[in-house]
């Protein structure tokens, strides 16, 4: 049986002048190599892919492939697009840079657009017919509307290059339907909340934004689960859930709290902050965020805080 895997949609490191910080980005990627976590590069949200120029996005892919390939899986989470034409163009850019797979969303919801079943099926058919490369599909309501499980299942059956499905924002019934309807080997990656059930049922691993800050904690959780040490895994799961519950205040976009934590903990790329339209909050809010982060007493965060020279919480 293959080992359970973790994948993270990774943040992009910027310099103080707002440009792509290539050296810091390589140091940032080292954290995922060390934790044995696969990376999705250039995400429209967490990776701030929609703020990147085409040349910057190309460099993100090139650096990720050069630095990580052969050590951890290197995928592209191409920024979601409104048309099949633009999705194909984005995928071809990533593939040309050497990524091992591309993640494809449904057509982006914009100006009240919500794809009908017919429209979404046609969109996926057009995109997948044009991409002769491993593809993961995103079953994610974050594009503005839910993607129905029967449509994802149909795409998995029709297109053998679909190697995995990322299940974010859906329940275990969705997963169970896909597992029974697809009828071939496809890897399913789930979020950590409620993951023990889905891992028992056959999920291949985890996908989570929190891995940007606590990658070793996620890896430990999966390792303990795989070793059958469920009580210890439950304690680590509780650490992750405390982190998720705390940072939820700065949602719905995890981009905010990821970059806030990078700044607070002095992580690679933190000095460059975040790109507009997002902004790092005022100093008082950052102090409050940092204090609350340290009070979580998550061991990995404690280690990062000591390395950054931060005082222990009172």
Image (spheres, grey):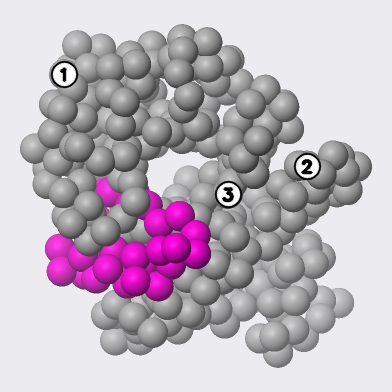
For the residues labelled 3 and 2, the Cα–Cα distance comes to 13 Å
Counting residues from the start of the chain, the first of labels 2 and 1 encountered is 1
Left/right placement of residue 237 relative to residue 8 reads right
- Looking at the rendered structure, which numbered label has been put on residue 6? 3
Is disc 3 surrounded by few (<14), some (14 to 19) or many (20+) residues within 10 Å? many
Mark 1 secondary-structure assignment: helix
Q: Name the image quarter holding the N terminus.
A: top right
Mark 2 secondary-structure assignment: helix
- Looking at the rendered structure, which numbered label has been put on residue 122? 1
For the residues labelled 3 and 1, the Cα–Cα distance comes to 31 Å
Residue 273 visible (yes or no)? yes
Q: Name the image quarter holding the C terminus.
A: bottom right
Q: Residue at x 74, y 50 (%)?
A: 223
Magenta segment, which residues?
50-79
Q: Are marks 2 and 1 in contact (CB under 8 Å)?
A: no
Left/right placement of residue 135 relative to residue 305 reads left
Q: Residue at x 31, y 39 (%)?
A: 134
Measuring from the top left, give residue 157's x and y in whole percent: 34, 16
Is disc 2 surrounded by few (<14), some (14 to 19) or many (20+) residues within 10 Å? some
Q: Is residue 250 above or below residue 166?
A: below
Q: Is residue 74 above or below residue 300?
A: above
Nearer to us in this view, 21 or 18: 21
Measuring from the top left, give residue 69's x and y in whole percent: 40, 63
Mark 2 sits on what residue?
A: 225
Q: Residue at x 28, y 49 (%)?
A: 78
Left/right placement of residue 105 relative to residue 182 reads left
């Amino acid at each position: 049986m293959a080992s359970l895997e973790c994948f993270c949609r990774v943040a992009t490191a910027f310099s103080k002048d707002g440009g792509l910080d290539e050296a810091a980005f390589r140091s940032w990627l080292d954290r995922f190599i060390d934790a044995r976590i696969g990376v999705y590069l250039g995400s429209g949200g967490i990776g701030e892919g929609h703020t990147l120029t085409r040349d910057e996005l190309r460099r993100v892919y090139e650096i990720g492939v050069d630095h990580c390939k052969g050590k951890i899986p290197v995928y592209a989470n191409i920024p979601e697009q409104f048309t099949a034409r633009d999705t194909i163009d984005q995928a071809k850019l990533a593939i040309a840079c050497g990524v091992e797979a591309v993640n494809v969303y449904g057509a982006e919801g914009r100006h009240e657009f919500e794809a009908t079943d017919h429209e979404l099926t046609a969109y996926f058919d057009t995109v997948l017919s044009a991409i002769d490369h491993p593809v993961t599909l995103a079953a994610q309501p974050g594009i503005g509307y839910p993607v129905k499980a029967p449509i994802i299942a149909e795409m998995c059956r029709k297109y053998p290059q679909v190697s995995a499905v990322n299940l974010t924002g859906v329940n275990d019934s969705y997963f169970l339907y896909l597992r029974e309807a697809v009828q071939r080997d496809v890897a399913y990656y789930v979020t950590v909340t409620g993951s023990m059930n889905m891992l028992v049922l056959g999920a291949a691993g985890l996908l989570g934004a929190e891995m940007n800050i606590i990658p070793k904690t996620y890896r430990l959780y999966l390792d303990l689960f795989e070793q059958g040490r469920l009580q210890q895994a439950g304690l680590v799961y509780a650490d992750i859930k405390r982190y998720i519950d705390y940072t939820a205040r700065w949602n719905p976009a995890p981009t905010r709290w990821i970059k806030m934590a990078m700044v607070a903990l002095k992580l690679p790329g933190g000095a460059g902050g975040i790109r507009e339209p997002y902004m790092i909050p005022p100093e008082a809010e950052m102090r409050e965020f940092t204090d609350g982060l340290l009070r979580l007493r998550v061991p990995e965060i404690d280690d990062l805080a000591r390395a950054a020279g931060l005082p222990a919480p009172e």
